[in-house]
Image (tube, helix red, strand yellow):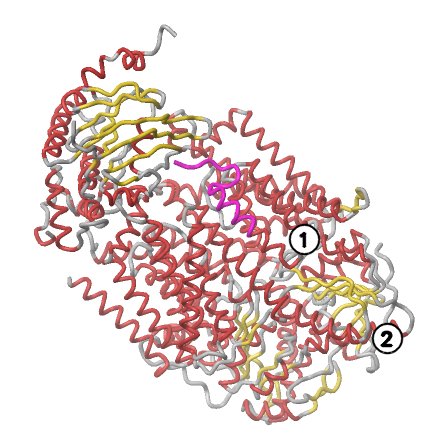
Amino acid sequence: MPILDALLNGLTLGGMYALVAVGLTLQYGVARIMNLAYGECLIAAAFAAYWLFSGLGLSPLLGLGLVVPLAFALHWLLYRLLLVPLVRRAKSRAALEVDSILATFGLLFIVEGIVLVLFGGNYYNYAYLAGVLDIGGTPLAYNRLLALGFALVLGLGLYLLLTRTRGGTALRAVAVDPVAAQLVAIDVRAAAALAFALGGALVAASGVLVSMFLTFNAAMGVVFTMKALIVVIMGGVGNLAGCLVAGLLLGFAESFVATYLDPGLTIAVNFALFLFILIVRPNGLFGRASA
Amino acid sequence: MTLRQLLLLTAGVGLLAAAALTPLIGSGYAMSMAINLLMFTALATAWALFSGPTGYISLATVAFFGIGAYTVAVVGEALPWGLVLALAAGLGFLVALVVGLSTLRLRGVYFVIFTFGLAELIRQLVTWYEANHAGSVGRFVFLDISQAQIVWQLTAVTAVVFLLGALLQRSRLGLTLRMIGDDETVALHCGANTTAAKLLAFSLSAALMALVGAIVAPRWTYLDPTIAFNPVVSFQVLIMALLGGAGRLYGPLLGVIPLVLLFEYLSAHFPNHFSILLGVTFLAIVYLVPNGVAGLAERYLGRPRPSQPAAAAPAQPKEGTS
Amino acid sequence: MTRAPILTVDGLSKRFGGLVAVDGLSFSVYPGEIVGLLGPNGSGKTTTMHLISGALKPSAGSIRLGGDEIAGQPPYRIARLGIARTFQLVRVLGSMTCLENVQAGLAFGPGALAGKAAAQRAHALLERVGMHPLADRPAGELTYLDQTRLELARALAVRPRLLLLDEWLAGLNPSELVEGIALLRALREDGITMVLVEHVMDAIRSLCDRCVVMNAGRKIADAQPEAALSDPEVVRAYLGDDDA
Amino acid sequence: MKLRRCSKILAVTAALAIAGLGAAHAQQPSSIRIGYAVSKTGPYAGGATTTTLPNYQLWVKEINDAGGIKVGDRRLPIEVVEYDDRSSSEEAVRAIERLINQDKVDFVLAPWGTALNLAVGPVLDRAGYPHLAVTSVSDMITQLSKRWKNAFFFGDTSANYARGVVSVLDQLRKDGKIGDTVAMVSVADQFGIELSKAAQAALDKAGFKLVYNQNYPIGTQDLQSLVNEMRRRNPDVVLAFSYPPDTIAFTDQAKALGLNPKVFYTAVGTAFPLYKQRFGDNIEGVMGTGGINPNSPAIKDYMERHQKALGKEPDRWLSPVTYASLQVLQQAIERAGTLDRQAVAKEIRSGTFDTIVGQISLQDQVYSGGWMVGQWQNGEFQAIAPLNRDGARPALVPKPAWK
C-alpha cells in the first residue's frame, strides 16, 4: 500500500533526522556552541564503528558502549580546553556565537583531516541488522527501526530528564538565561560543559547507528551538520520535543513527496518546508520569542 | 581627508593596480592567484556591506554567486557580454529583494540558517528544472574570455565594491545599517525605515555577488548546480570576512589575503595533511587574534574613532569635529 | 479648553491572545501639556506607549496625532510625524559615539540634517542634556545615568511634537532627580508636549499638568495630579482591593 | 625540494606585485616531472581514490622500479608533484596552473570526473599539454575533442553507455528471457540525466515500456520510496543511473524491500570492490557500468599487481582504462624519444599502443573500445557489452533473487 509505505518510510527517515539533530540541540541550545564540526564528529563515530566491526569483529551495538563514553569524555575535554577560553572572553552571546563558529570551523578541518589520514577519502560501509521486518506488506529494515527507536527514546528520555530532574532544570536555566542561572548558584560553566559533552555523546551514538545503513566517507560531515542545524532551528533552539517533531516532519515530507509527487523534489520540498516554517514562526516550531 | 585615509586610499589603489597588472607581467599561475584574491575580496567585502554593520550573518552568498554564474551558462553565448553581466547583477538584485521581503524579520541564528536553506533550495530547484526541462544538468560555458580579462573585470568590480562601500559609510543608508546592527528598535523610533534599508543593502550586496559569479564562470568551462551553488563558498566568504573584521570596509580584505595565501601555501606543500594543518592554523588565528585582523592592525596603526575608553578618557571635545 | 488636542486616543485596545492589555482606552493630550500615565504594574501603561509609538499594532481603536490617524502605522513613520520616545530599559546605540547617537536621531524625516549641520545640532543637543564632554565616547561604555540622558538627547533630535518618556526618571538619586525634573520642565518651555510613564510621585506632582491613571488596561481616572491620586478607585487600585 | 617549493611560493606571492620568475629548469633533464591534482578530499574523493589515484601511484611505482621511462638513449625516472583539488573546479584550475607555471612539470595527469576534466581542459589546451581524460563520461566529448587538439578521451559518451545497456536488454528480449517493462531512476546530475535521456530514447526505439522513470537529488541515500514504487510496478528490468553511495543504498534497499527484477542494473560504483565487499554473494547477476575481461592474462596480471602494490583491488570499470591511458602516455614518450609535448601528443593522436586492455588507437582523440556493461558472475565483473566483442560473455538472466 503506497500510503503505508510512505508513512513508514517517513517515520524511519524522520527518526534518523531527529536522531542526528538531538545532540546539536544540547550543544547549541544549552552550551551555546554553534558546532560546525558536529557532522565530522558523527562521521568519526561512524568510522570508529566501522573499524570496530570489520577490524575487531565487535558488533556496532557493543561499539556504542565504547564509542559513546569516549565521545563524551573527548567532548568534555574539548569544551574545557578549547571552548572555555572563548566563553570567557566573549562579551555577549553574539560574540560567543561568532567565536564558536570560527573555532569549530577550524575543528571541522582537524577532525576531517584525522579521519582522512586514517581512512582516506574512500567510501565505506558495512551491513549490520540489515534484516527486514514486515509490517502490513511494507518491509522495514531492523537497523532503521533501531535508529528510529533510539531517536524516540533519546528525545523523550532527554525531554523528561530536562523537565523532571533538578540537573535538567539547571541545564534549562542555563539555556534560557546564563546570567540569572549564575545568580541562583548554578555552576554555569560545568552545566554547559556537561551539555556539550552530552551532545557529543549523542552525536557519536547517532553516528554509530547511521553507519549501519548509510555509505559514508570522510567528506560527508557537512551534510549531517547542515541537516542537524535545519532540524534544530526548525524545531526551536534547545527544544528536544521540537527537534523530534521537526525531524519527523521533514521525514514525512520527503517520503510523501517521493511517493506522490516527484523524487527529484524531495530535498527542495524539505528546504521549502523549513523556510516556510521560519517565515510563519520566526523562532521555530516550539521556539520562544527572545527578548 | 586625514593622513590615515590617504594612506588607506593609496594602499587600496596600489593593491588594485598590482592585481590589474598581473596579466601583463605574471604567469598563468600568478593570474590564477590574482583571480582568487580578487574574487574573495569582492565577495567578502560585498558580504560585509550588508552583514558587517547590521550583524545579519548571511550564508546566502553562494545563492547569488551561483545565480550570476548560471546566468552566464544560460545566456552567455546568446547576448553581448555587457548585457549578460547586467542581467546577472539584475537577477541577483531581484532575487535578493523577493527573499529579503520574507526573511529580514528573522534574527540571529534563525536568519543564518534560513539563508543557508535558501541557497540550498535554489540549488535544488535549478537542478530539478535542468533535469526535467533542460535535458541535462550540466552546462558548458565556451566564451572567448581570457584569464586576463577575468582579472581586469574582477579588479573593476572590486573597485566598485570598495567605492560603493565608502559611499555607503558616508550615506544615511550606511548610518541606518549601523543603527540596525546596534538596536533595530531604536533605529525604527528614530524614524529610520529599517526594512527598506535592509532590503536595499541586502539586494545591492547580492547584485555584486552575482556579478562576481558571472565574471568567474567562464573560467570553469563546465557548470552544474553543485559547482555553482557550492555552500563551501558561503562559508569561506563568511569566515574570511569575520576573521578580517566585518565592521570596517577594509576588514574583509585583511581576512582574505592571509587566508587565501594560507590555503594556497598548505595546498601546495601539504596536499596530504591540508585539512589538519588548516584546522590547527585556523584555531591558532582565532585564539591569538581575537578581534579580527582589522582589530589587530588598528592596535598598531591607531584607531579611526576614539572608541577605547583609554583613548577618550577625560576628553575635552575636539573642536575640529564640530 | 478650545485648543485642538495634539494626541487623541480613542477606544484603544490591545489583546495578546486571550489577555487584554489595553481595553478601550481614550484620552487626549493638548499642546504644551505634560501628561502622566500612571497605574500599578501590569496595568497597560508601557503597552499604551508602544501602541502610540507604533512598536505594537492596536487590536482596535484610533490614535490621532494632530489630524493624522497613526494607529497601526510603522514606528518609523510615526517618528517622522513627530513622536519620539525613550525606553523603559534604556536603549542606546552601543557601538556608536554619543554624538553619532544624536545624529542618528537627526538623520530622518522632514527637516533631517546631515554632515556639518547635523554635527553642530547634535553638539547643541548633547549640551542641552549636559553631556557635551562625552560626545566622542561610545555610548555602550556610558554609565546608566548618562545613557538615559543620551537617550533623551536622541529623542529630542527626532524633533518631536510629542515626547514619550517611559520611566525616564527611574533610578536617579535625589539630586539627579532635581536636575532631571528641571530639564524636563525646561523642555516644556521650549514647547515640547510630553506623556510620561512614571512611578516617582514627586516628579509627577511637580511636573504633570494632568494624570491619566490606568488599571487592568482601562482608564480609571483623568484629572490633575492631586485629584487623580486621591481618587478612591486609584487608591484602591494601588493598594489592592481588600473589600473584594 | 620542500625548500625550493617554499621559495617558489614566496616568489608567487611577490609575483602579484612584480614579475613572476619561476626557477630556471635544468637543461639536461635527469627525470621526468609529472604532476597531477586529484580529489583526495571533498565529494569526489570517493571516486578519485578508487579509480584514479591508485593507478597513478601504481604506474609511477612500476616505472621507477624499472628504472624510468626510456627517452632517447636514457632512462628517466618519474618525479611526482601531487596536489589535492579538494573536489573544487577553481582549486583544480589553480593546481594545474601551479603545476605548469611553478613546478614546470613535463606532463600533467588528468583529474577525476567530468566536471574537473572540463574545468582544467582550457588550461592544459592553452599550455599545450596532452590531456588524457579517463573518468569523464559525457556527450560533449566529440565536440570537446574538436576544440582541444591535445585532449584525449578514454571514457565514452553517455549515449554509447546507454545504448550499450539497451542492446543487452534487446538481446535478452529476443532470447525470450525478459519481457518489455523497464523501471528507471537516475541521479539528477549531468551524468545521470544524460544517460537516462539517452536510455529513454533507445528504449523507446527498441519498443520497451518504461513503467517508471524518475530522478533523485545527488547525495540522496534514502531511496526506499523509489524502490517501493518500482516494486509495485513489478518491472522486468530495473535501471539505476546512480553514483557510488546511492548505488550501494539502492541495492541495499532493493534487497531489503524485495525488489527482484530479472535484470538489475546500477551505474557507477557497481564495479567497485566496495560493492563486492558489501553485498557478498548477493552481487551475482547484478549488472553495472563497465566490466572487464577476467580471462585476459594482462588484466589478471594487472589485478594482481594492483592488489600487491596497493593492498586493494581496482574497480572493474575505469581502473584498467586509467592504467592503460598511462601506458599510452609512456609509450608515446618513448616513441617520440623526447619530452617535447607536441611531439608526444602527435604520437598519441596517431599511434597504436599495446596496453592491458588490448591494442588501443584513438579515433579523433577518442578511445571507444571500453566495456559498456558488466555483470557480476562468479565473483568477477564480467563484461557483457558490446555484445559481440572478444571477451564478452552472455548475460546471466534472470538475476537470482536476493538472499
Q: How crowded is mark 1: few (under 14 residues within 10 Å), some or many (20 or more)?
A: many
Residue B31 relative to residue C68: left or right: right
- Chain of the residue that carries numbered disc 1 in the rendered image: A
Residue at 18 percent across and 43 percent down: it is C159
Badges 1 and 2: C-beta atoms under 8 Å apart?
A: no
Q: How crowded is mark 2: few (under 14 residues within 10 Å), some or many (20 or more)?
A: some
Residue C42 relative to residue A139: left or right: left
Can you name the residue that lies furthest to the right here? D176
Tell me which segment is drawn in magenta.
Answer: A272-291
Mark 2 — residue? D171
Determine if the magenta segment contains residue B218. no
Mark 1 — residue? A214
Residue at 53 percent across and 53 percent down: it is A111
Where disc 1 sits, the SS reads: loop
Report the amino acid beneath label 2: Gln
Distance between mark 1 and mark 2 Cα atoms:
35 Å
Q: Is residue D122 visible?
A: yes
Where disc 2 sits, the SS reads: helix
